[in-house]
């Protein structure tokens, strides 16, 4: 963000600004720049997405920088509706990130932490593989930004199916990118990531209910003056589910957890997330036993998954090796399941869900047993 200032020595400052801009796009980032970028991303995850901060420790080292950069970017994009005073500013920020990503993949990343770390991950991937999967990473990343942009105004999802589509294009896509950055090319792993990512996107929507339904907050300028407000309260639960149980947005904004029908609606949406986790667990069990997944992958024919088409006919040993190697990426399922368990304990009242102290242990146990 830039702020207007009344300054002297305008010529000197203009010269320094031009110098910074010339430095702003460079393919030459030293080890210190990358380390600082990595520390920035870790700090953002530690304070803004602690589940991801824990999971990153189980992601293979070949994909860890990409994971850190992508999850930090996702955090930045998710925060935008809460930190801008109107959608137009948010769209400008989205375009900034779209341009930034294009520059990163063109080899001219700006001097910005997420860009530096992501560029380092892409360079590493290219050096190891010749860059065969880099094109897919760019496609998925731009899809993530476009999907976030379409939902900038925090309007309710029309249907539960549209919430699943959103989750596929955000949280499942983040998992695809992590697998691609390792790289791990397996249609079965993509299939697992699709179900787990859908569950994670639904869980993220449920977790956001107490935050988004809260009153808007004042935005302060550099001098402390009020310059606008954040968005008004919002409820993203699918409209078809809300209509079925008789839940009204206004009641949630006014009465919070006491709104009639809220717990029924949350239960229905949470059940869909849990269904995806159950499907992923059954599929993983089948694959580890050398069997077929048990059902078709709906995105199997899409070009971005064609790189793994051969894995459909891969042997039992290949599939088992893929699962072991990429299992850290699948641990997103454990974090999602942990939240759903706590939500059930709160009788599906998202305002009363307690924090989790068991998640680090649950992740370690799941990684050791290869179970989600």
Image (cartoon, helix red, strand yellow):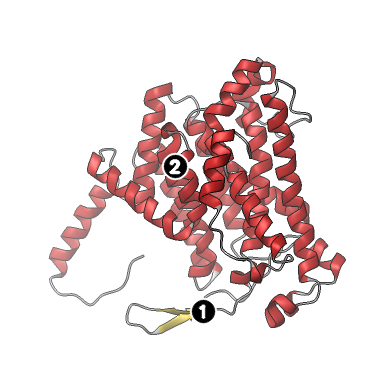
Q: How many marks?
A: 2
Mark 1 burial class by Cα count in 10 Å: few <14, some 14-19, many 20+: some
Indicate the secondary structure of the residue bearing disc 2.
Answer: helix
Camera-near label (1 vs 2) is: 2
Residue at 26% in and 75% down: 5
Residue 338 at x, y percent in the picture: 62, 53
Indicate the secondary structure of the residue bearing disc 1.
Answer: loop
Quadrant (top left, top right, bottom left, bottom right) of the C terminus: top right
Residue 88's disc is none
Residue 217's disc is 1
Give the vertical position of 101 relative to 185 (above or below). below
Asked whether the viewer can see residue 168, the reply is: no
Give the vertical position of 126 relative to 218 (above or below). above
Residue 353 at x, y percent in the picture: 63, 66
Mark 2 burial class by Cα count in 10 Å: few <14, some 14-19, many 20+: few
Choose between 93 and 47: the one closer to the eye. Answer: 47
Cβ atoms at labels 1 and 2 below 8 Å apart: no
Mark 1 to mark 2 CA distance (whole Å):
35 Å
Write down the residue under mark 2. Answer: 57
Give the vertical position of 110 relative to 77 (above or below). above
For residue 307, what is the image quadrant? Answer: top right
Question: Disc 1 or 2, which lies upstream in sequence?
Answer: 2
Determine whether, in the image, residue 32 is placed left or right of residue 344.
left
Give the vertical position of 160 relative to 107 (above or below). below
Choose between 282 and 120: the one closer to the eye. Answer: 282
Residue 167 at x, y percent in the picture: 65, 49
Residue 362 at x, y percent in the picture: 56, 47
């Amino acid at each position: 963000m830039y702020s207007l200032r009344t300054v002297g020595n305008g010529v000197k400052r203009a010269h320094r600004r031009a110098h910074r801009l010339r430095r702003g796009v460079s393919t030459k980032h030293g080890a210190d720049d990358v380390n600082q970028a990595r520390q920035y991303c870790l700090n953002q995850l530690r304070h803004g997405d602690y589940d991801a901060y824990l999971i990153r420790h189980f992601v293979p080292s070949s994909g860890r920088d990409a994971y850190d950069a992508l999850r930090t970017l996702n955090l930045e994009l998710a925060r935008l509706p809460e930190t801008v005073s109107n959608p137009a500013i948010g769209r400008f920020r989205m375009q900034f990130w779209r341009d930034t990503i294009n520059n990163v993949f063109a080899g001219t990343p700006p001097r910005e932490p997420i860009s530096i770390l992501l560029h380092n991950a892409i360079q590493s991937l290219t050096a190891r593989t010749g860059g065969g999967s880099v094109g897919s990473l760019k496609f998925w990343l731009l899809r993530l930004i476009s999907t976030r942009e379409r939902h900038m105004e925090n309007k309710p999802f029309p249907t539960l199916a549209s919430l699943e589509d959103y989750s596929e294009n955000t949280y499942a896509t983040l998992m695809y990118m992590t697998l691609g950055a390792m790289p791990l090319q397996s249609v079965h792993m993509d299939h697992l990531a699709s179900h787990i990512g859908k569950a994670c996107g639904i869980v993220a929507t449920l977790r956001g209910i107490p935050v988004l339904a809260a009153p808007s907050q004042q935005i302060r300028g550099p001098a402390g003056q009020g310059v606008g407000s954040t968005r008004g309260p919002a409820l993203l639960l699918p409209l078809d589910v809300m209509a079925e149980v008789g839940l009204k947005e206004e009641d949630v904004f006014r009465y919070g957890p006491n709104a009639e029908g809220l717990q029924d609606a949350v239960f229905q949406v949470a059940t869909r997330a849990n269904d995806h986790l159950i499907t992923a667990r059954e599929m993983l069990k089948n694959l580890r036993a050398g069997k077929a997944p048990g059902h078709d992958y709906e995105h199997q024919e899409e070009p971005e998954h064609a790189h793994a088409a051969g894995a459909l006919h891969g042997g039992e040993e290949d599939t088992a090796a893929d699962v072991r190697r990429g299992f850290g990426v699948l641990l997103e399922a454990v974090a999602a399941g942990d939240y759903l368990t706590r939500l059930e304990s709160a009788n599906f009242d998202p305002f009363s869900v307690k924090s989790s102290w068991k998640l680090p242990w649950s992740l370690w146990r799941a990684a050791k047993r290869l179970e989600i």
